[in-house]
Amino acid sequence: MFRKILIANRGEIALRVICACKELDIRTVAVYSEADRYSLHVRFADEAVCIGPPRSSDSYLNVASIISAAEITGADAIHPGYGFLAESPYFAEVCETSNLTFIGPRPDAIRLMGDKNQARKAMADLGLPILPGSAVVQSEDEALAAAEQVGYPVMVKAAAGGGGRGMRIVHSAEEMPSMFQTAQNEAAASFGAPDVYLEKYIESPRHIEFQVMGDGHGKVVHLGERECTIQRRHQKLLEESPSTQLDPETRQRVGHQVVDALQKIGYSNAGTVELLMDEKRNLYFLEMNTRIQVEHPVTEMVTGLDLVKMQILIAAGEHLPIEGETVGLRGHAIECRICAENPETFAPSAGKITAFHAPGGTGVRVDTAAYAESVIPPYYDSMIAKLVVHGKDRAEAINRMARALEMFIIEGISTSIPIHEKVMADPDFRAGKFDTHFLSRFSKNGNNL
Ligand code: MV4
């Protein structure tokens, strides 16, 4: 087993990894930027190393500083959390060549899934259903020909993209030239690679994702699905498990397809397979994320497992302690992402938290690194807390979330708590009736993007 793990991240996920290490009796090393000197991950880790100035590119993305910190402190493994370097095949490789275990999938699996078009093709070859679409298209003419094959409307997507960035909807051939160019330019500017491909556009889909875990000894399991349809500008606002849209037979059938595909490529550690559900409830592979995700706690609540501990044990060479290809699911869990943001513009709202009280009680979990008098720096993601509840069924979980939101006090900055309260009170949400456009009803301009 590892003696010491360096956590190459900040905020709530750094604390989450520290919790798992403490329970496994593994020492921890925090790394922090100059803006995070008074952060809780620095306080709760056994050791802490400053890795540079506030900007991410100078600190949490600085591979040389992080590897040096691991070498100086004698760490034997690195947990990357999510974001930052979590899905960099280069970073995973540098860890390996520096004799540090990267707690995550193999670099080649990260690389494959990082190319969304290659991933789509690989998963189709492995038996997962995909939407009609194309390979990478190099020109307007190629894009027009491919769209003719697929049928409008289509979506132009960046091969190096994912998570909704670098995407364009194209309704007709007339729109293609300008949309193709914008998508290519955006892809080149955002990801350093202009490659784009086409996919049939689903107007009112739901986003359903399967949590998977592989042990690198040929065993892969799925841990049920999460419903992540309620998003704003491609940022998830809340997630729940299970989805109201999957019956046990569909869960078992699709779960088996996912497990079978990943077993064939020898996938190891945590992963998430994103699927799109169309209006007829058909499911299609969209992309795969090769990291522990923000929303992993809802899966932990319904499975009773500690996914971060599992990641660490698997990286240390242990076998998955699960018979068969899945586990039983109990009750219903919901997570609300509490962000520091201006309620009108949704712009991140940095500053000092003047008062802070987190709710508790039966079935309530709060993952956060915020506290009274803590300062939210302007340099990083705006998510400051995850409020997670579990209930015997969806109705109890929603009621529990509503009361927990009411009992959450965060003063000094504005947060997304009011919008979550509106969602919990919404009759359509309570009935499970929503699609990707759901949040537009709460914005003045009707815009959900
Ligand atoms: C789509 C789509 C419709 N058709 N692909 C957005 C996040 C990224 N992972 C994929 N996304 C979408 N891909 C096809 N072929 C619609 C979306 C989408 C979306 C998906 C889930 C939740 C909210 C969304 C909001 C806008 C667009």
Image (tube, rainbow, N blue to C red):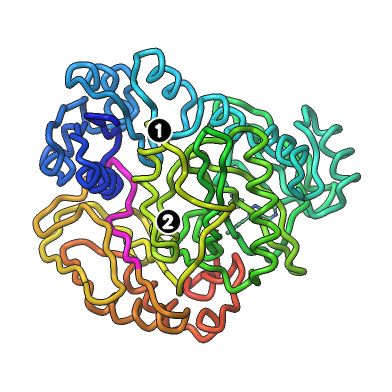
Q: Residue at x 49, y 25 (%)?
A: 89
Q: Amino acid at mark 2?
A: Glu
The local crowd at label 1, few if under 14, some if 14 to 19, many if 20 or more residues have their Cα within 10 Å, is many
Q: Position of residue 113 (x, y in %)?
A: 60, 35
The local secondary structure at tag 2 comes to loop
Above or below residue 442? Residue 342 is above
- Quadrant location of the N terminus in the rendered image: top left
Query: Image height check: is 124 above or below 99?
Result: below
Residue span colored magenta: 379-388
Total marks shown come to 2
Magenta stretch, main secondary structure, is strand
- Residue displayed at 41% across by 36% down: 318
Image quadrant of ligand 1 equals bottom right
User: Is 210 left, or right, of 88 in this rendering?
Assistant: right
Which residue, given by chain and number where applicable, does mark 1 sit on? Answer: 315
Crowd rating for badge 2 (residues with CA inside 10 Å; few <14, some 14–19, many 20+)? many
The image's mark for residue 283 is none
The image shows residue 269 at horizontal and vertical percentages of: 47, 38
SS of the residue at dot 1?
Answer: helix
Q: Label 2 belongs to which residue? A: 295
Label 1 CB less than 8 angstroms from ligand 1 = no
Residue 32 visible to an observer of this rendering: no
Residue 284: x and y, percent?
Answer: 72, 53
